[in-house]
Image (tube, helix red, strand yellow):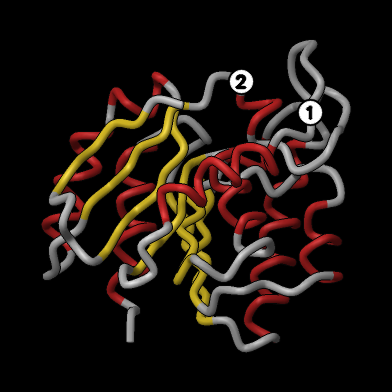
Amino acid sequence: MGIHEFGNKDANIVLIQMVDSHDLEGIENEIRIISDSIEVDFYMAAVDVADWNQDLSPWKAPAVFGKNDFGDGASVTLEKIKKLCEDRSKTYYIGGYSLAGLFAIWASYQTDIFRGVAAASPSMWFPGFVEYMKDNTIWVDTVYLSLGDKEHKARNPVMASVKDKITEAYEWLKANDIDCILEWNEGNHFKDFDIRTAKAFSWIMNRRK
């Protein structure tokens, strides 16, 4: 599990983000935006994910795009992430883009080590996920959600459900007293991923009590 480090490793605030090569293309811009948006020092561990469909999926599901089905490797991935969060004197936030955003939300149901979740354009269309949220307990009190205003116009009917699913999740979180926002961005799923993720982390960090 490769880790790309940014910021001050001695900082009390630690950001955990699951990334692939595409995310890394914009990670330095993302870090700059976060640094300009908050007034505290932070450290980011950007964690390489080899196989997103396997390593970030909470349970098995049939392929939605391409031929690769979704696995159930999220639990194994989370155990590795926990090892980055062993200093409990520090404050940890988890986030990511797309399926990494979904993983971040799921992780907040498995452990109380995270203070908040930064889920930018998360894959809320993932089969059964919103139902899982409603049937289980979330252990964070701050959640950022966002979506591009054209993402639901996908040809794939499962992915096209993302607007309805994320709205349903947001309304459920608000009804259960979670400090939450749902922000709409211009464009489809592939636009401004670095900016969207930076906005997500900046919002939850600025909500800290």
Q: Which mark is residue 3?
A: none
Left/right placement of residue 39 relative to residue 52 reads left
Residue at point 64%, 70% (across, down): 170
Q: Is residue 118 above or below residue 123?
A: below
Residue at point 32%, 38% (across, down): 194
Q: Choose between 82 and 55: the one closer to the eye.
A: 82
Where, by quadrant of the figure, is residue 28 drawn? top left
Q: Position of residue 192 (x, y in %)?
A: 35, 37
Is the residue marked by circle 1 packed among few (<14), some (14-19), or many (20+) residues within 10 Å? some
Is the residue marked by circle 2 packed among few (<14), some (14-19), or many (20+) residues within 10 Å? few
Residue at point 45%, 55% (across, down): 94
Residue at point 61%, 88% (across, down): 177
Callout 1 amino acid: Gly
Callout 2 amino acid: Asp
Q: Is residue 154 above or below residue 175?
A: above
Q: Which mark is residue 51?
A: 2
Left/right placement of residue 209 relative to residue 69 reads left
Q: Position of residue 144 (x, y in %)?
A: 48, 65
Q: Which residue is mark 1?
A: 71
The quadrant the C terminus occupies is bottom left
Residues tagged 1 and 2 counted as in contact (Cβ below 8 A): yes
